Image (cartoon, coloured by chain):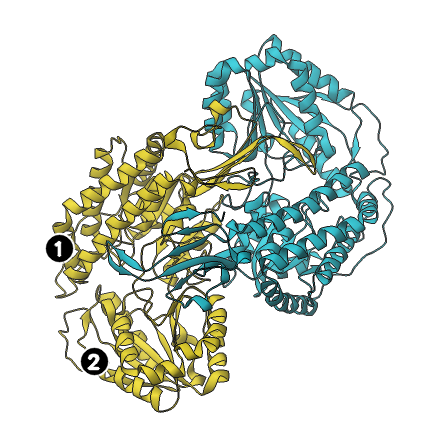
Chain colours: A yellow, B cyan
Amino acid sequence: MSPSVDPRTGAELPAIASDTTEEALDALCDSATRSGVELARLGRHGRARMLEAMADALEQRRERIVETANRETALGAGRLDGELTRTTYQLRLFADVLREGSYLEAVVDHAGQSAMGPRPDVRRILRPIGSVAVFGASNFPLAFSVPGGDTASALAAGCPVVAKAHPLHPATSVLAHEALAAGATAAGLEAAPVSLVFGVEAGGALVRHASIQAVGFTGSLGVGRLLADSAAARPSPIPFYGELGALNAVVVLPGAAAGRPDQIAQGLAASFMLGVGQFCTKPGLVLVPAGADGSRLVDELVSSVAASTPGVMLGPDIARHFAERAAVIASQPGVSVLASSSHAVDPRSSSGTPVVVRAEAGALRGVVLEECFGPLLVVATYEGPDQLASLLDLVGPGLTATVHGEPVETAEAGGILEVLAGRVGRLVWNGYPTGVAVCWAMHHGGPYPATTSSLHTSVGATAIRRWLRPVAYQDVPDMLLPEELREEPSPDARVPRRVDGVLVVPG
Amino acid sequence: MSPSVDPRTGAELPAIASDTTEEALDALCDSATRSGVELARLGRHGRARMLEAMADALEQRRERIVETANRETALGAGRLDGELTRTTYQLRLFADVLREGSYLEAVVDHAGQSAMGPRPDVRRILRPIGSVAVFGASNFPLAFSVPGGDTASALAAGCPVVAKAHPLHPATSVLAHEALAAGATAAGLEAAPVSLVFGVEAGGALVRHASIQAVGFTGSLGVGRLLADSAAARPSPIPFYGELGALNAVVVLPGAAAGRPDQIAQGLAASFMLGVGQFCTKPGLVLVPAGADGSRLVDELVSSVAASTPGVMLGPDIARHFAERAAVIASQPGVSVLASSSHAVDPRSSSGTPVVVRAEAGALRGVVLEECFGPLLVVATYEGPDQLASLLDLVGPGLTATVHGEPVETAEAGGILEVLAGRVGRLVWNGYPTGVAVCWAMHHGGPYPATTSSLHTSVGATAIRRWLRPVAYQDVPDMLLPEELREEPSPDARVPRRVDGVLVVPG
């Protein structure tokens, strides 16, 4: 692995691990398969305790993890502290999901008559698909990396994880992996349910490895598509759950621009510059009404950006790529720079200078409408609802779309939300898209390329569904059924089930 | 389209339609998009009524449809009559699924505090993905073709369907399409929610068409993989739900062989010869204990097959392919023919002669363990549980696996079922895999190549999940939410929901 550097100073950091060889990968995958048997034996309640033990083990290492991640990513101790809280919360949420048991989608159809004649007893449950690969993200060294939501949901499902460490935070990955291993040991496991690989080649080999049954990935469109194609081209193709980036459009309706121009401008500025613009949910485009109200909003946005301080990005390659990309966008015909931070930066650091550009309607295409990873926001104005509709037609799929409106303009807003609902996975009203709550209802995905599968994605309780597949049991004797499918399940095995078509929730 | 022939006589049948041109395909896809707006406007209850009207319209044409399908496929009036019943039953099942409403996976998380700080109000529901392509199967001209489960589940989801007619039953496809159109009109639709295309090239273009968002396919491994690869290689890849065939192993445990050798042999013979072996769930391999009991079972199987009458297959290409494949299997080292039907057949007909072969343990590989579409069954014997386990290790993924056992051998059976549960989508106990009940619990899929996605497949109530994607609404005002997500839904919009983590079923 090429050495990583401290993004604040450019100083080289100590090497953490060498690239995983093919033989080592085979051994890790074999061990993962053995661990799958143990995860099954633990059962739902045992796996819930294991996830909680992992959360505890992460907590015990909080200080070292946050410090290490901060040195490697420059995301800041406060943000990383919160991210670790998110990470342990995710693990505990999946413990709840396991205990509640709906995720099994248990269905019991007793034998009987149907319009097609006699019908056998058929019972259905979800089972783990096998070992899965998880690729850590650069921008979330914890919550979307080794100990993140992909890992938590896969382990909950009963699937061992082989995690690919991101090259920008190898030491954090090793520490997190240690914590997960300690949690597994505390829960009584012998084979490690999570293992760690390093290096680009090992990552590619992992996606092609015969024992891997699915992939979770958060990262760039380029790498993501390459790996997705590789997963689809296997002799036995496997699902690839990738989150590859999005524009995240924001629409400000006239009433909102009139009523709260400063507030929206400040909120938007904070949102697109949050974490130096390195969120997959960063707002990348705002559509503002032409005229005095919109101008006031844009003026306030310009002031906020001009007064901002450039932050340090995740690494030199990412900072250079952002600067290049921002320059390309600014040089498009019909695009002009409205403001950028005027603060000087240390040239040895991986700093990213916030920029806001204005694009004419005709310039809303190509690179201007693609995700720019970093603190850049495109502003465009519209004259009335018809032009707004036609501009929205130019915007491709995304993870989120946001609408700011006032109660008096809900009719218009309804039509816009309906159009946007067809293109994104989350609609935000009078808010900002950054900050993805971890809860049962959350969804973080959208039509390609926002995510490679818009059916099930990496955030929210249903993330577990990616690692499960149904099996139906026909006329199988009660004692040979999975416990949750038996006629009279033991108290621990009582889960919500659909029985003869009727959903029954245990009292 | 090349003309199809009467498989019973070899006589050419009248041409039904010419190949769909690229321009015509564009027009049909445009019309499908318009129809999607109407399907959304109908709502759940309106779409339920539409599906029932379609079932009624198929019933009204029952005689003509069965007669036409029988002429085109030679499957027999009795079987096709039952298949039409299955088809209308499927449509009505999805009307039930719509009215019940669980399929929406509605989740409401009210705003509140979490371990990560204040959390917004987030509500999640599933929405239709857009227009979908459905490829008709050769062997189910109704239940897995134009009016089949893929179409029923897609329309239920609110997704317009562009159906590719199978070249072996174009007239049946046209009649079924007329019935669906009549049902749609009766339900008040203006744009047709189902349209029909013909020809290999149009099928390929359909999978690549920008307006198509997913594909349902039942057919051969060769064609299926080609189309799956094409779906994955699109600029925006789309999910491809293919069912590509399986071996469907049957295990007879010693107690069962001792207790009911004749009954199992006769049941197995009937199952593998049913529909001239043209079921995707046809048992293709049976593992029988060595010794007297197993021999008696095999002897009875041989008698049944020797006394059988060859049936007419779906068409000359299919019959020729089966005969060639059977010859290749029979010529493998370690494989010998135990019996085949001794009845003469009309050489002009597309007849398929039932065959049962024995394979030594060493011959269980390659073509011997691949699906052979037609009435061929491979018999292998095992000496004790260890050899049984090692033979099972040779068997790849499948749609189903079947175990015959007696109550005294349930402990052994449990271990075998557990191994098989990792490889197939349905486990059958003391039964036969042909005959797939339509019910909430049914699952028809398995690891590749049984199906290209083992998450969600074409049979059972959850087939609808393939055509839906989640959207989360964050802080969206109540009146702008989908009705099922509102704080106080109207009586028609009350569906099972998870509210703040708790599953609530309307009383």
Residue type at mark 2 is Ser
Q: Position of residue A330 (x, y in %)?
A: 33, 82
B140 and B46: which one is in front? Answer: B46
Q: Position of residue B4 (x, y in %)?
A: 80, 50
Tell me, yes or no, if residue B386 can be seen here.
Answer: yes
Give the mark count: 2
Q: Disc 2 to disc 1, how far (Cα)?
A: 28 Å
Residue most extreme to the top: B292
Residue beneath label 2, please? Answer: A341
Quadrant of residue A178 within the rendered picture: top left
Q: Quadrant of the N terminus of chain B?
A: bottom right
Circle 1: is it few (<14), some (14-19), or many (20+) Cα within 10 Å? some
At x 21% / y 64%, what residue is drawn?
A: A315
Left or right: B57 as drawn, with respect to B46:
right
Residue type at mark 1 is Glu
Left or right: A414 as drawn, with respect to A165:
right
Image height of B506 relative to B198, above or below: above
Q: Position of residue A174 (x, y in %)?
A: 20, 46
B261 and A187: which one is in front? Answer: A187
Q: Chain of mark 2?
A: A
Residue most extreme to the bottom: A292
At x 27% / y 66%, what residue is drawn?
A: A278
Q: Are marks 2 and 1 on the same chain?
A: yes
Q: Chain of mark 1?
A: A
A78 and B91: which one is in front? Answer: B91
Left or right: A435 as drawn, with respect to B372:
left
Residue beneath label 1, please? Answer: A67
User: Does the residue at mark 2 contact the one at mark 1 (Cβ under 8 Å)?
Assistant: no
